Amino acid sequence: MIISKYDADALRAALGIEMSGIEGAGVGAGWGRVAPGLASDPDRHDETEVFVITAGHGEVVVEGRRQSVEAGSMVVFEPFETHVLENTGEDDLVFLTMYWRDAERAGQAASKSAGRLTERPQFVFSTPPTPNGDLHLGHLSGPYLGADAYVRFQRMNGAEAWHLTGSDDFQSYVQAAARRDGREPSETAAHFSAEIAATLELLDAAPDQYTVTNADGEYPDALREFFSRLVSSEGIAAKEAPALFDAATGRYLYEVDVSGACPTCHSTTSGNICEECGEPNSVVDLIDPVASASRTKPRTGTATRYMLPLHEYRQDVEEHQRAGRTPARLRELAHRIFQRAPYDVALTHPSDWGVEPAEPAAKGQVMWVWPEMAYGFLHGIQSLGRRIGRAWEASAPADDWKIVHFFGYDNSFYHSVLYPALYKLAHPGWKADIDYHVNEFYLLEGAKFSTSRRHAIWGKDILTPDSVDAVRYFLARTRPEGRRTNFETAAFGRLLDEELIGTWQHWLRDLGERVSKEYGGVVPDAGRWRPEHSAFLARLENRRRALTQALSADAFSLNQAAEELGALVRDAVRFSAQEASTAGIERWSSESRTAIALELAAAQLLAQCAAPVMPRFAGRLSAALGGSEPDTWPQTVQLVEPGTAVDLTDAVFFTPVAAHESGQA
């Protein structure tokens, strides 16, 4: 027999609170104490865990949901549930914990990740594009297709999810484009913002909220209020520091106005961020800098700007990254940055394009657009809420908000390091729950997309109602997830002609012809089942599960989803060929009906599971099978209702590249 009693003197600091262990219990066990006003660190693990509250009262927070607990309460945490225990009372909150590994339970919990966010509002952001040009395939392959497919899948699983983005109007790159074109920055921003919105429509990725910052009358004052929150937190302050200036014009230099070699990786870079290694620079630390306008070596002077001592917030950033989905690539970047010498980030810059803060010390300066974006996301949520009747306030972000960011690696520093620090300062009580999905560069024929070198395929050049699903599928298969990948025009043509038309469409039309010829165009009821039939059904179920996993929040990968869609079709084609030998033989007619019913079930599953990636194809295929637009994710593989009319024989889901180019599509 083992008897353990709570002993405050035996407690030691652990998980942000105080804990002590219990030996010999047969499971992991221990006592814990949460002092008034404190909370445990967010914890997520593969064990099943039980808390038994023995004194005090407070709240448990699981995946952003809060529940009151008090002495006598027992809470069971499933594997992989992120949980926090907070003391909201005036006395110590004391609890007993027990935890153990159960491989079967952990496996089941892992497979249920697709539905774990259904009870919370999800705000899924694709990086607000800079309106200094339209969107090309390099842009579209990453954040915009990713966020759209993510939201479609979440909605099919019953979640409240919205895709939000907007035009990042106050970028210095907009001002540079305006100077180049002889326009006002506001004209350039408005023109390309509209072009970008139109391209997203062509991709079938139009967001639910598209915020145009320079056209939103409430935005500037609300942004100033956010900045004032940062100043009043005393986490940032106006500080004189070295800066670069154009030796010929005296112009203050940052971002697009200056280039040089990155002080970390020595790649060619513009000011403030290196696209290659992802690390920020302070501009004055560029190697051999050159002013973009005069092509001269800049002179070094000083400027007084509001500065954030980022190194002081390492612990806050790392705690934030532990709480949500933060890929190792981003955690490694943060580690590199915090290993550097103390680093002050300039949050304001001298400029006449942007929003000037209200603070007198910032006169003649604007809030740098990247920290501005930290507020812009909250403003987008508020704007969406007002349109759909939800009381979401940018000034009071809620713990139950689930924010999901899709962005390119070159924006990683801002999203996963800078913004968590700013949110901690502006809203110290907010437990920002943010997941990050990052993509690398997408190349074109082996080289970077480049507007200046005319090395780009613009969205409007390739997207039509007849090509959009083929483009989405190709981008899903080749988008740069974890590595740089490449768009090749010839490879796209081969995939369209050989796979989507030559395999997918050929199989579906052939299936339609067989249903028409043998069963009068209606779905037959399954007859006798053979082992091969049940084995194929099991294979389809495995594909359904794999697609569910590939599109789920934790494991989201369009590369994997596209591979599984292609594999589902290949499975069906192989099964069809195997069963063809006995088709038309009367003595095996019952078994043939089962085979046809299973092929139709495969086609129906394809329509349902393709919906997040290829929505038009999915809708057309579902209609050809006598169904409605797929809006619910399949929980199992089901046979198509016998007697349903099928219209696949002459269905056209994809058209050849030549038809697109000649305007015949």
Image (cartoon, rainbow, N blue to C red):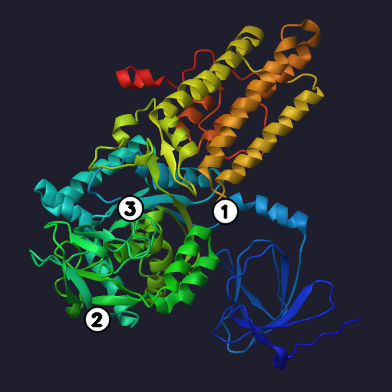
Give the quarter of the figure containing the C terminus: top left
* Neighbour tally class for label 2: few under 14, some 14-19, many 20 plus, Cα within 10 Å: some
The residue singled out by tag 2 in the image is 239
Single out the residue that lies furthest toward the right.
1
Q: Earlier in the sequence, mark 1 or mark 3?
A: 3
The number of discs equals 3
Q: Position of residue 542 (x, y in %)?
A: 68, 37
Q: Which residue position holds label 1?
A: 554
Answer left or right for 288 relative to 113: left
Whether residue 49 is visible here, answered yes or no, is yes
The residue at the point 55 percent across, 30 percent down is: 607
Q: Amino acid at mark 2?
A: Lys
- Kind of residue indicated by mark 1: Asp
Q: Earlier in the sequence, mark 3 or mark 2?
A: 3
Q: Please, is residue 317 above or below residue 659 in the view?
A: below
Give whichever of 427, 372 is nearer the camera.
372
* Residue under numbered circle 3: 128
